Image (cartoon, rainbow, N blue to C red):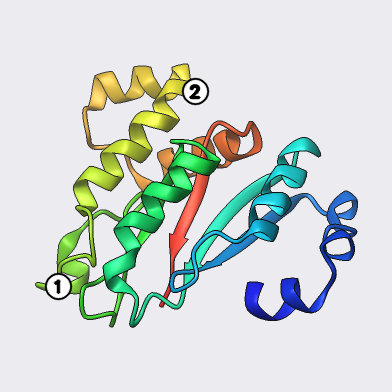
Amino acid sequence: MEGVLWRSLSPSRALLPLPGVESVLLVINAGIGIETLTYRAFEAARTQGKVDMIAINHIDGNQDKLSELVYDIQAKFGCRCLPVNLSTANLDAVVDCYLHCVSDEVGDSEPLFHSVSAARDELVDTVLEEDEDLMELYLEQGDNLTPEQLHQPLETALRMHHYRHEALYR
């Protein structure tokens, strides 16, 4: 998207649709990294109160840059930019770290970087900070929250701009 849509439009024209949308998906090319227009689009979306998500594409061939790119995203856009999906090291599957943290879904494949359980812990901790009812449930049930219990609080956190979703795609 970024390589086609954003570059084909002048920076001011690329931001024109923002008032008419509820959410914004910024796509960052892993080989290129965060571009000036990406940062401008993020700031414009934030200023206008949009729900924003970041997707990283073109990770195949750029695996060595991915960890540093996630660090850059967190440094520029906030520490609450957390991976929700992680590609496996062989790039043949994607693991949902938040709702379905079960490593047997992808067999013996390890994530490309990071740990699925660490990513899930960061995500759940962030959402728990924003939802007192879920926190009480978590304290009662422990780490056994179901996807159904976690889904709505994540959406609420996104709408309240307390959390930024980062998806990693091939």
Q: For the view shown, which residue lies furthest in the front direction?
A: 36
Q: Distance between the residues labelled 2 and 1?
A: 32 Å
Which residue is the site of mark 1?
109
Work out whether residue 150 or residue 5 is closer to the camera in this orientation and state it.
5
Where 109 falls versus 160 (above or below)?
below
Work out whether residue 140 or residue 167 is closer to the camera in this orientation and state it.
167
For image coordinates 50% across by 36% down, the residue present is: 78
Which residue is the site of mark 2?
130
Quadrant (top left, top right, bottom left, bottom right) of the N terminus: bottom right
The image quadrant that residue 59 belongs to is: bottom left
Residue 158: x and y in percent read 59, 40
Taking the image as shown, residue 101 lies to the left or right of residue 42, namely left
Work out whether residue 95 or residue 111 is closer to the camera in this orientation and state it.
111
Do tag 2 and tag 1 residues touch (Cβ < 8 Å)? no
User: Label 1's element?
Assistant: loop
Q: What residue type is labelled 1?
A: Ser
The image quadrant that residue 143 belongs to is: top left
